[in-house]
Amino acid sequence: MSALTTNDKLVRMANQIAGFFRSYPDDEAVAGIHKHIVAFWTPKMRRALEAHGPTEGSGLDPLALKAITTSPDQNDSPVRAATNDPHLQGAGASDAG
């Protein structure tokens, strides 16, 4: 069994984030993934994923790929507060919480 590369780990983490946002409309999911990666990943991690993501066979979820290759307009975004700013989760923005 071979060890996972750094890129494999970044792809796995980005795909987990995309899995969380899968039930959201695409625009909200992409904005939420983008915001999460920008808020919680180091610049080095983001640069590595941005370089690896668009390559053939990267294994990156299509929503995560779109999130790292576009910059959603947060001003006009339909994203709910907890999606736009994950630290607000539970602040009345979710019917689960």
Image (cartoon, rainbow, N blue to C red):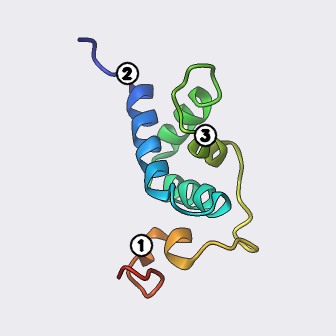
- Earlier-in-chain disc, 1 versus 2: 2
**Residue situated furthest bottom in the rendering:** 92
- Mark on residue 87? 1
- Mark on residue 51? none
Question: Counting other residues with Cα less than 10 Å from the Cα at mark 1, is it few (<14), some (14-19), or many (20 or more)?
Answer: few
Disc number lying in front (3 or 2): 3
Residue 7 at x, y = what percent? 45, 27
Which residue is disc 2 drawn over? 5
- For label 2, the SS is loop
- Earlier-in-chain disc, 3 versus 1: 3
Question: Which residue type carries mark 3?
Answer: Pro
* Position of 94 relative to 10 (above/below): below
**Residue situated furthest left in the rendering:** 1
Question: Which residue type carries mark 2?
Answer: Thr
- Earlier-in-chain disc, 3 versus 2: 2
Residue 91 at x, y = what percent? 42, 85
Give the image quarter of residue 28.
bottom right
> Which residue does the image show at 32% across and 22% down from the upper left?
4
Residue contact at pointers 1 and 2, CB within 8 angstroms: no
Question: Counting other residues with Cα less than 10 Å from the Cα at mark 2, is it few (<14), some (14-19), or many (20 or more)?
Answer: few
Residue contact at pointers 3 and 1, CB within 8 angstroms: no
Q: Along the horizontal axis of the image, is 18 left or right of 89? A: right
Residue 87 at x, y = what percent? 42, 72
Q: CA distance from mark 3 to mark 1?
A: 24 Å
> Which residue does the image show at 62% across and 19% down from the upper left?
56
* Position of 48 relative to 63 (above/below): above
Instruction: Report the quarter where the N terminus lies.
Output: top left
- Mark on residue 62? 3
Give the image quarter of residue 62.
top right
Q: CA distance from mark 3 to mark 2?
A: 20 Å
Question: Counting other residues with Cα less than 10 Å from the Cα at mark 3, is it few (<14), some (14-19), or many (20 or more)?
Answer: few
